[in-house]
Each structure stands twice: as structure tokens, then as C-alpha cells.
Image (cartoon, helix red, strand yellow):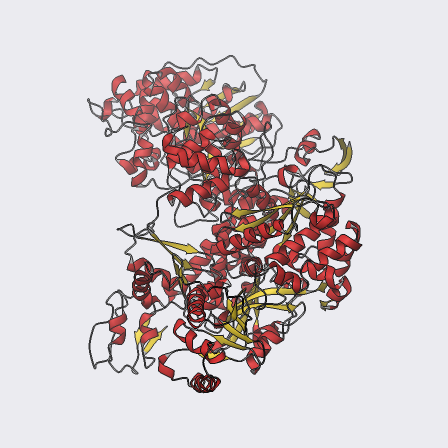
Amino acid sequence: MVKLKINNKEIIVEDGMPVMKAARQLGVDIPNLCWHDDLEHFTSCMLCLVKDNRNGRLFPSCSVSVSDGMDIITDDEEIYEARQMALELLLSEHVGDCEAPCRIACPAHMNIPLMNRYIAAGKFDEALKVVKKDIVLPSVLGRICPAPCEGACHRKTIDEPVSICLLKRFAGDEGAEPLLSKVEKTGYSAGIIGAGPAGLAAAYYLQIRGIQVALFDSEQKPGGKLRTGIDQEILPHDVLDREIEAVLATGVQFFGGEKIDTSRFDEMKNNYNVVIIATGTISENSGTFGLKTTPQGILADKNTYQTSEGNIFVTGNAIRSSRLAVRSVGQGKEVAFSVWQYLNNEPVKGEPSLFNSRFGKLLSSEFSEYLKESVSYKRIYPIDGGRNGFTAAEAVDEALRCLHCDCRAVDSCKLRIYSDRYRADQRRFKTSERRKIVKLNTHATLIYEPNKCIRCGICVRLTAKYGEKFGFTYIGRGFDVELGVPFNEDIRNALTETAIMVAEGCPVGAIELKST
Amino acid sequence: MNEKFQNIDRIIEEKGLEKNSLIPILQAIQKEYNYLPEEVLRYLSEKTSNTPADVIGVASFYKQFRMNPAGKHMVKICVGTACHVKGSGLVLDAFRRHFELPQGVDTDKTGTYTLEKVSCLGCCTLAPVVQVDNITYGHVAPDQVDQVIKDFERQKDKKGANKVRKPDGSPVKGEIRIGLGSCCVASGSGEIRKEVESVVNQNGLRVKLKHVGCVGMCHQVPLVEIVPNEGESTLYARVKPEDVKNIIESHFSPPGIFSKLKNRLFSFVEDIQTDRNWDGIERYEINMREKPVASFLGKQLPLATEYRGMINPLDIDDYISRGGFSALKKIFETMTPDDVIEEVKNSGIRGRGGAGFPTGVKWEFVKKEKGDQKYLICNGDEGDPGAFMDRMLLESYPYRVIEGILIAAYAVGINRGFLYIRAEYPLAVQRIRQALDICREHNFLGENIRGSGFNLDLSVYEGAGAFVCGEETALIASVEGKRGFPRMRPPFPAQKGLWGFPTLVNNTETLAQISYILREGSGKFKSIGTENNSGTKVFALAGKVARGGLIEVPMGVTIRQVVEEIGGGIANGREFKAVQVGGPSGGCIPAEFADTPINYESLNEMGAMMGSGGLVVLDDTDCMVDIARYFLSFTQDESCGKCTFCRIGTKRMLDILEKITKGNGKQSDLAELERLAEWTKKGSLCGLGKTAPNPVLSTLRYYRHEYEAHINGKCPTGKCTDMIKYSVNDNCIGCTMCAQKCPVDAIPFTPHEKHSIDTELCIKCDSCRAVCPVDAIDVK
């Protein structure tokens, strides 16, 4: 047994144990990518660098065994910089998108590729469920949204973007309203001023979190500009009413024809735990309730929408005017998250926006790789004209055009998680030429994208350990080293028994199971 | 047994089924097929314990192995440091043009020639060097490619007169020594040897013909030395085959010829030797006592290279008669292993591989480790693109290296050892193999060596081309038959080395100095050099120096002494700018610091490093940013690819340097470069990555203004081709020579008129400037 200090805490551990494992016993999780619990250490990623406090030197904690009297620091400014640097180097040749570009472009951050997959599979109800996680009024927006998502769609580089907006409309029109599981009432309450897209969204996402919402509007009917500012030809009222009904069905109490002036506002502050201002673009007529303003609107934190008065939030056009209803809907969802944090006495940070790897434009030589998971025909236009939306068959066919640009490991990728934690900048070491994207998808259960590989060699070590006939191997060396199958054998022959193990072992999205 | 693969079965049987046989097997297969055919590799993975992943992993790691068939003849373009500073890049481009090779293709359309870049052919003083199969061409200019290929076509099928001199047993009148070091062989000493043999045979001369290893005077090769039994010996430099007859006959008379005639002949030859215009033969005599040459050899102190030029590499009796194996005898008879270690510790010798760890201490570490088995590896994986000391020591003093190994093994208690030698050094491999056989015959190896009761078995392991394998943990992985991935130390090889057993890894040069220490005593060794830096160091002196070659100097001599006194200053009247010490791990020391003594600490302080001992002298025409880029491109290419900082860090540094040398740099790039360099040093796993940024950091330290000049759009020396333009000035006499030389017709053929260069077409090959008789080509 040896005695050492990790972050100034003494610990006694077994002889020969790597420092990284010893730290775990103290609950200190040292970042790592090339480490695998079933394998010998390999010392490749260098993310696990820690400091020997006795001489100030950095060393990889996966590969150095504990020794008596060691004094280890696992986190300080220098180590932070080392990890950030290692991540930035890895990211500089990591060619792939974490989230799909369409999702990043969507002001409501809707999981578009997932919706597409459900539609393509004929699972329209599930599709709507996905949509409703972020967008409360899909049928409405499906008729009026200018679709910034389609501008970012990689498919646009090949031929035309996927018809995302119409697919969302289809999901809203044809999917069954998702049954919401009963949430326990929290006892908290919120008053929302304004029942336009932002207010409706905020109301919905608060109510389903167990916060009782009272929604006020000066008009008799909710909907705000959606009801008053848009031609019925484009957005028929029955569509609007149906989706508003779904919001109110969650338990939101609506009070129409209520004009909120400063005294009513003060009253609301007393009656509800929080008050959300969603009154739309501020003008001379609209009140600012004595809050600080900017030339654009009421002053609030741009991430959390919280005002300097902690229990008052602002959302939608009341902060800054925008012609995008989808932005208001998105902000309504986001403010609900901030309010929820506030009410739970958590630090109010707003919805987390995680690190996203992005590779930019798809090259023509890569079209065929992306099309491996798609269909080659051009964009489908509704046979009855755009106003009428897709038929089910059309929707399925169009959804099949999606290239699935989102990474399969979007939630589990360690590179992404650490890049977020260490605020890594992918573009720091921008190079003129990036690696080409390849998608090897002949394997029944998994897919290999070498351009996402970080050369940690876990796949090589696993396939060797479990006796795969071909397995994976390093091919070449240095910067250009690739991980591949010997003799250019098909990946099906490389990964037989170990397929799932390898896919799960891959710390990034290079080798991933297809089903997810 | 598979009929088709009978040859492979034979190879496997010979080399073994185990994993550690993989590299030798692959080498044998490549010898047989000229590349590694996939079906053979598949067969191999079925027949041996190597999986397909092992086979491909290893085959694709080492540079030596080719996965595609190569042309009938290999054209190796040396891009080592010395060749680089003398323009090998332009030569390479010229060959590519000659063979019309598109990017990514190395074999010409007819499949006759394959072009290969090699990092060092070890003929730095003949730079730029090109080797076509076994014929070496030195001082190749970009416009001589046609000539080289034509000459090769003429020479390739010729067989030299294969007359062998008959030993007649009669007393010899003297000795004729022919240099057979790599530089000499490369420069044609093989031809000379044949010619000498033929002249000696025809005339029935009673002289002893002797082949000697490298003399160190590589800039004057091929060398022939005539040593009469009486009188002064004479050294002839740059000898051509047609000179041989006259030289020999001037010294030795054939039997039966009257002495008068002999004398007449002698004086006749004496006359013409001083006549430089003698029938167009570029040849001159070198008298060792003439001042510059005397100082060239005289200022040095040969220990590892003791008896240079006098000793026949493979003649064990010759070695013994000059004190060889006396140190071994001494320790066997009078010293315990601990005494030997004590003596080596007292001598203060430090590892000559670069890092300078005290050798005796290392021996002690290995000795203290408990283990049923211990191994010794002589590290001869010399990969520095501007150094060839190990190669010279192995080729020319094989017994001295072996004696050093024997002493080390005896002291530490090791019975099994390997000499890891690059396969790119075929002569060294061959000589050592022969020397090991001869040692076995003489019981200097094997069981109960010379009655001492001590056993040692030694064998050669051929490295397959990976600079990183100079790092000891990578070296060990390579001997085990794996990819040359270094691993984290500790555990050090002394604790867990080859196959997990305690292993002593010593550099070739270190081992070559051991016998001197034991023979002469540690006190004498310690008296050489300086405090903490005892003994001598061998350097490969090359670059822009007047006289290049291998030198061995006491530690502590200054850079100035080496460059000026030994190297004879800068060639062609240019100005001394800097010296690059330590190759890819080292750095540049500017001329103003030329009084820096050469030792481990002072070089480190200057931002350089002893490294393996490459010493490349740079003059005012050398661009320091280009030098940094050159070395970084080398290490980047040689990175094993295991750890993030080295694999990607060196690449990104190179990206920035390339951007700068292309004229696209920004001021902020320098800070980014420094930050990358700092982290690549700190975050890399092994010595390769930890030292790779040194050439960049040292040039940034001393020549930041040159980097800034590039960023401001100007390469001060005009070396960076993307930043320069060729033009014709008013000196032009309209001779059309440039137009004739231009390989891309960028200069219109306009006799008697001032020429012009179409900069759109110009490929900046420098041919026009080189050929212009009146300096009418400007490079700006």
C-alpha cells in the first residue's frame, strides 16, 4: 500500500495503481479519452495530464503508478490550459458535426433529424413528440416559418434542402398530441403577460414542469400577433386554435381582455412567484413596468432572460423585436427553463448550449458518403401545392431525404463533453485542408466514420484482446495514421463478436451503433 | 505446405514463428518481391502467431516497407540536412519532372524507376547526393538529372574487371590503403579498388592491399594512401580510376624493371602531380603535413575512431595488434564487474545518444534490478538526417563496438545482446555480422569467453526505418516486433525493458569509447574534455564548411574551433551565419555565439542540444525559417502518431511555418507558434515530441527578425521559393544559356538580346541562375 496526496487529500491505495484510478477513489474524475477500464493504458490522448506538485511537472495520470509521498494536483490553470490545448488539437482534425446544422440554425433548437427519422419510419406520433419538446406550435410555424434550418441543411449543397418546415407542419397536423405524464405540482406559480407565441410557449413549458401558470392577454382570445397579424389564408384560425387548445389543456389558466398596467403588475408580483413579460415589441403604448430598457426593449440577461429584479423575466419581442415567430417560441421555451432553475434555487444559467463541432461545407466528393444513408431523389413538393402540406406518403419520402448529419454520439461523445467543459475552440488551429468524410456503413449494426476518429486505439486493443480474426489496426503512422481493417477487409469481417463492445468503447462518434 | 508460398515457408522457418520475427520476415519478403504483396502477408498471418492486425500495423509503420511494387531501379534522393541546405529540394523536383511524376506517384510510367526521398545517405560532404541503385552521384545539380540517368544506364550492366590478386607469399614492399567507408564507397572507391587490384596484379607488385574504414576526410574522397615500408606515406585525394596506374607505378616498381627506369618514372609522375592542368583530370595530391589538412586531422582526438585510416575494419588481428581486446583481457583478469562499473562511473562518461545520462549509473541501475534474464541493446538506430557517426563506427570499428558491449555485458551481468542497426546501413549490418562471426571463431563471443567463464551471445537486429526507434522504449518495441510506439517511463528499460526484463540500452558511440576507458584508465579519460563533460564526441560536420567529414573532438572545444580550425571556415567566401547542432532535436546557434564550448549543458542553454552529433554549418544564404520548417517537417513526418501533442502539435506548427514561408503569415502566428511549441514540449510523451520544437524555438529566439521579414512579405535570403521571383538584369549578354537550360521554356530563345523570364511559367528551379556566366539572373 502507498500513501499519497491528491488535491491535498491523503489517500492510501494499492501498490502499482495508476494515479488516475487512485484519484477516482477520492471521487476525482480525471478527464480521459484513450482510457478503457478493460484495457492496458496506452497514453495517447494526453487529456489526463496532472501535476506533480513536488516538481511542477505534468504527466499522464493513466500511465504513472502511485508511489509513496506523491503530491498530485488534478486541476489548476496550467492543467486546464493543457487539456484545452489537447482538445483543440484533436478538434482541429475532427471532421464532423455534433448536432446537425439545421438544428443549430433553428432558433428553437429543435431536433430536426430525429423528427425526420420518425416521419420516415411512419411514426408520426413520435415525430410530434420530438417536435413538441422544443416547439409548442408546430402546425402554426409549419405554415409561417421562413425556415432558417433549411438554409443550413447540408442537403442543400447536394441538391435542395430537406423540406423541414413542411415536415414539421405534417407532424403537427397528423401526429397525435403527445400524452403528457402527470407531473407533480410544485406549488409554484407564474404569471405571464401576453399570450402570443412567446407567452404560449413559456406557459406550456412551465405548466408541464408542474408550475401553475396564469396567462393574461389584452385580447379576448390568446394567440397575439399570430391571430391578428397573419392572413387566414396562410394560417387558418382553426389550426391556431387547435394548438392553443393543446397548451391550455395542460392546465394553464387563461385570462383574456386583461390589460396589465403598473399597478396590476405590482399585484402580479405579489400573487405569483415569478412574472414573465411576453407582451411583444414594446412601443409607446406598451408599458415597461418601470424596468430598465434598451433601445430594443426591456433589459434582461440574453441567456437567462432574467431582469435585474430576480423574479421578473422577459421573453420574445419584448426584449428585442424579431419577425421570426419561431424565435419567440424558442425563447418562450428557454425562459421557462430559466424560471424553473430560479424556482429550484439553482444558479440561473438558462438552457445549456453545448459545444458543437462543425466542419463547414460538404464537398462534392463527399456527397456519395452522405447519400449512403439517404435517398438520391430531389426535394418533394406537395402535389396539392405548398399551402396544403404533405400527404403521408410524401412526408415519408421527403423525410427519407434527410442526411442525418447529427452525430450518433451527440450525447455520449467524451470529446464533446470535455470540449464544452474546457471551452475548447475548434477553429483555433484552422487548416487549409480538412480530412475527407467517409462513412463505412456496410456493417449490420454499426457505422464507422474515420474522419471522427481520435486515434486512441481502443478499437485496436479491444479487437486484439478478444481475438477478432481481422479486427482493427493502425495503418501508417504520424499525423496521417488511420485506424482501419487489415487488408482492406470489410468492416463486417473486422468486428464480429466485438461489434457492440467496440462501438460502446469508442469515446467519440467514430464507431457507433446504427440503431441509436 | 502451399506450393505457391514455399519461399515464404522457408523464410518463416529461418526467422521463426514468433512475434519478434515479424520485422525480419517482412524484410526478407520485401527482398524477395521488392514489395510486400498482400497475398503473401495474408499467408504470413495464417502461418505465424502474427494476426493480420499485427502484420499490417507493423508493415505500415516502418518506412522501409512498400505495399506496392516499385520500379526496377530505385532513385534515392537524399534530403538530409546537408543536402537540404545545398538544394536537394530542387534536385528532387527536377527528378520528378524528368520522370513526369504527378503528385502522389513515385514510379515512372514504364515502371523502370522509383523515386524515393531518404533522410540521409550519410554522404553529407558530397551533398546533394542521389543514389541510383548502388551507384552514388554527388554534387548533383538540378540540371544534371539527364546526365545522371544516362550515366546510370551506361554503368548498370557493366561489370568491373574482376581480377583478384594472387597472394604470392613474397614480402611486401608497402601497403596501399583504400578507404571503404560509406563516403568513399559512394564516391567510387569500389572502382578504385578494382583498378588498384588490377594494376597490382598485372605488375605483380609485392604490396599489401588494405581496406580501411572511414578516415574522416569525407570531402576528399575517394582516398588512396600509399604507405611504403620506408619513407613518408602519401595520401591521394579525389582519385579517379584512370589515375591509379600512375600513382601506384610512381611508388612501387614492378619486379624486374631497372631502378633507373623506376626513378625516372617516379620523377616524371612527381612533376605531373603538381600540374593542375594535367589532361583535364580533377585530381590533386594531399600531403598530410600541409597545413590545412594537418589541422583538419591534428586538432582532433580519436578515441572511438582511434587508428582511423590505419585499421582494417574486419581484420581482428590488426585490431588486437593495436591494443584491441586488451581492455577486455584486463577486466577478465583483474577486475570484478563492480570494479568495471566503478571505473566507468569514475570516467564521467555520459550517453552519447544525446541526453547525456551518466553511463556508469545506468549500468548500475540495470545491475541492481532482479531478473532471470537481462538484455543489452546497442542503439545504432541513427536517424538524424545530418549525422552518420554510428554508421561510421559500426562500419569501420566493429570490434571496438563489440568490445565495448562485452565490457558492459560483463559488468552488468548480461548474456544476451542485440545490435540494433538501421537496415538503411547495409554495409554496417554486413560488417557487424561478419565481425560477430569472427568473434565467435576467436571465442570473443559465445560460451566461456577467453576462459573467463563469462558468456555472451550477440546478434544484429535490423531496424526498418523509423526515427522514433532511436528512443529506447520505441527501440525495444521494435525489437519485440511491434510498431515503434514509445511508452511512458517509468518504468525505465533498466527496470522493465525487452520482453519485460531489465535491459541496458546504450548508444553505439558510448560503447565505442568504453574500451579506451578500461584500457587507459578512467583518470586518463576524465582528463580529456572538461569537468562534467569528459572524453570526446564524434560529430558529422557538414553544410557550408570548406572541409566536412567526421570529426572526433574533446568535449569543450568551441564551435569556432570546429568550424574554423577543423572545418577550414566557410566555403566559397560566404559569411558564417550559424551552426545547427543536434539535428531535429537541436537548435541553431548564431555565429556571434561561436565561442560557446560544445558540451551538454552549454548547448542546452543556447537552446540547442548535443543530440546525436550532427553539426551543420550555415552561411548567409541560408534562410532560418526554412531551416526550422525543414527540421519540423522531418520530425512531423517521423512522429509515431501516438500522443496528441506530438502527432497534431507538430503538424499544426508545420502548417504555420509553411504559411509563413509561403508569404501568408500573420504577426499573431508567431505567438501561436510559440504556444504550440511550448505545449508540444510539455505534453509529448517521448523525446521526439519533447525536442521537436527546439529548431523552431531556437530560430525564433535568435532570428525572430527573419520570421517577421517573411510576414512582411520578404524572404531575406531568397530561399523560400514562394516568396521570390526570378528576373534578368542588364548584365545579360544574350548568350541563351539560360534559355537552353530552362526546363519549362519560361525564357524565350532570343540570341544577342537581353533575355526575359515569364514568371507565370517559371518554376524557380534555379537552373538559369546557376548556368548564367555573367550573374544576370536576379532572385528577389
Location of residue B548 in the rendering, given as x and y in whole percent from the top left corner: 52, 71
Location of residue A72 in the rendering, given as x and y in whole percent from the top left corner: 71, 41
Residue A324 falls left or right of residue B385: left
Location of residue A165 in the rendering, given as x and y in whole percent from the top left corner: 32, 28
Residue at position x 26%, y 51% from top? B110
Location of residue A193 in the rendering, given as x and y in whole percent from the top left corner: 47, 27
- Residue situated in front as seen by the camera: B418 or B324: B324
**Residue B257 against residue B540 in the figure, above or below:** below
**Residue B102 against residue B280 in the figure, above or below:** above
Q: Which image quadrant is residue B579 in?
A: bottom right
Q: Which image quadrant is residue B98 in?
A: bottom left
Residue B655 falls left or right of residue A210: left
Count of all numbered marks drawn on residues in the image = 0
Residue at position x 59%, y 78% from top? B295
Residue at position x 62%, y 57% from top? B399
Viewer can see residue B123: no
Residue at position x 38%, y 83% from top? B278
The N terminus of chain B - image quarter: top left
- Residue situated in front as seen by the camera: B622 or A174: B622
Viewer can see residue B4: yes
**Residue B140 against residue B778 in the figure, above or below:** above
The C terminus of chain B - image quarter: bottom left
Residue A402 falls left or right of residue A279: left
Find the residue positioned furthest to the front: B256
- Residue situated in front as seen by the camera: A487 or B769: A487
